[in-house]
């Protein structure tokens, strides 16, 4: 089974990190891999891709004419790919050497349309003690409460995994028309940040199954210093809440997973944290509990703002 891995980038900023991501793909234990590097509207970046990777037999370099955003750039990458499976990796991530082997094993053993895995943190600037694990999803890391039955160690069906660790059978992706450029990539007028949930919700509706999550398919996401800044996190939380409301309007079948997570957060995580704090008081536990309420509040505020925009 040939796997085409698409990595998109739009500037030369942090180019070394993108090269590390590319090398992690080329170093996979699975031996039938194609790497597709997409320059999103930057000629200089495209030329650099060609200079550094163009001579590799299993690398394809391509570019878009303009900066079209992540969703459309991914579609441009799959348009020149020849794999049986399309997989996606961000330019600031590092794939475990067995990442694709684990995903391929899912396709070989199960008749599923898509497969994805676990995102683990690579704390470039150090782990922020104040950030509760329930909100690791804000920094692109698999969070506490994710997965079938809310267990990130359990394999099974989920609506979607993170966009830096997700794959689709080629025929499924093409039948769905790929990612919606108006939703993904933050290029649309209404700033939706929900390209993966939207595509996977359509897939679940069309094919009767979401993404098969396997925690053994691991990708490390680099969490840079700006992503651990409290101001950045609350802003991210706000726009994620806004995006959830937009998704409810545009793709009604996409709802459910967020409400399940919120229910688990309020009925399980919060009581457990309060109980733990009473039994074993600590500054870190207290700060994380406060952060949990603050971030939940900003998600809610973004959702309410979304009702004024989307109705």
Image (cartoon, rainbow, N blue to C red):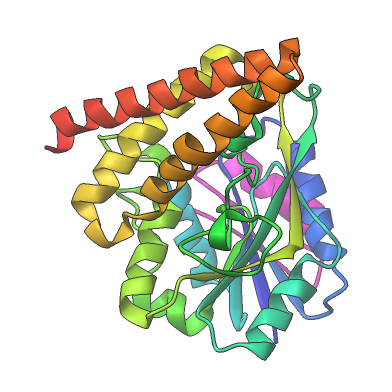
Q: Quadrant of residue 196?
A: bottom left
Apparent side of residue 114 relative to residue 61 in the rendered image (left or right)? left
Identify the magenta region: 37-64
Vertical position of residue 228 compared to residue 51: above or below: above
- In the picture, the quarter occupied by the N terminus is bottom right
Give the residue drawn at x 21%, y 52%. 250
Q: Quadrant of residue 5?
A: bottom right
Magenta stretch containing residue 309, yes or no?
Answer: no
Residue reaching furthest front?
279
Q: Which is nearer the eye, 75 or 120?
A: 120
Q: Quadrant of residue 38?
A: bottom right
Apparent side of residue 182 relative to residue 270 in the rendered image (left or right)? left
Residue reaching furthest left?
311
Vertical position of residue 65 compared to residue 214: above or below: above
Can residue 149 be seen here? The reply is: yes
Apparent side of residue 33 relative to residue 185 in the rendered image (left or right)? right
Q: Could you tell me residue 31's position as x and y percent?
A: 84, 79
Give the residue drawn at x 60%, y 23%. 274
Q: Which is nearer the eye, 163 or 142?
A: 142
Q: Could you tell me residue 188's position as x and y percent?
A: 30, 40
Q: Could you tell me residue 311's position as x and y percent?
A: 11, 37
Can residue 69 be seen here? The reply is: no
Give the residue drawn at x 62%, y 43%. 143
Give the residue drawn at x 88%, y 64%. 27
Q: Which is nearer the eye, 191 or 242?
A: 242
Magenta stretch containing residue 39, yes or no?
Answer: yes
């Amino acid at each position: 089974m040939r796997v085409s891995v698409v990595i998109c980038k739009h500037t030369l900023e942090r180019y070394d990190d993108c090269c590390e991501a590319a090398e992690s793909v080329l170093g996979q234990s699975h031996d039938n891999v194609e790497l597709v590097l997409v320059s999103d509207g930057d000629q200089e970046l495209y030329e650099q891709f060609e200079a550094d990777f163009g001579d590799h037999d299993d690398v394809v370099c391509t570019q878009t004419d303009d900066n079209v955003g992540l969703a459309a750039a991914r579609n441009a990458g799959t348009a020149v790919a020849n794999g049986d499976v399309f997989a996606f990796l961000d330019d600031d991530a590092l794939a475990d050497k067995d990442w694709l082997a684990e995903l391929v094993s899912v396709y070989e053993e199960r008749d599923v349309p898509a497969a994805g895995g676990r995102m683990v943190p690579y704390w470039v600037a150090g782990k922020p003690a104040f950030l509760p694990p329930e909100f690791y999803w804000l920094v692109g890391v698999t969070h506490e409460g994710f997965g079938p039955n809310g267990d990130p160690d359990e394999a099974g069906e989920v609506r979607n995994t993170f966009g830096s660790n997700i794959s689709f059978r080629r025929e499924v992706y093409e039948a769905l028309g790929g990612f919606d450029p108006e939703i993904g990539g933050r290029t649309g007028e209404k700033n939706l940040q929900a390209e993966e949930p939207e595509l996977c919700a359509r897939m679940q509706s069309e094919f009767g199954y979401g993404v098969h999550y396997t925690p053994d398919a691991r990708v490390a996401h680099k969490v840079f210093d700006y992503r651990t800044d409290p101001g950045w996190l609350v802003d991210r939380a706000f726009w994620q809440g806004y995006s959830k409301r937009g998704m409810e309007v545009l793709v009604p079948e996409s709802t459910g997973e967020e409400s399940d997570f919120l229910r688990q957060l309020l009925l399980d995580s919060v009581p457990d944290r309060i109980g733990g704090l009473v039994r074993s008081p600590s500054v870190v536990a207290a700060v994380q509990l406060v952060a949990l309420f603050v971030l939940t509040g900003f998600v809610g505020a973004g959702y309410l703002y979304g009702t004024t925009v989307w109705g």
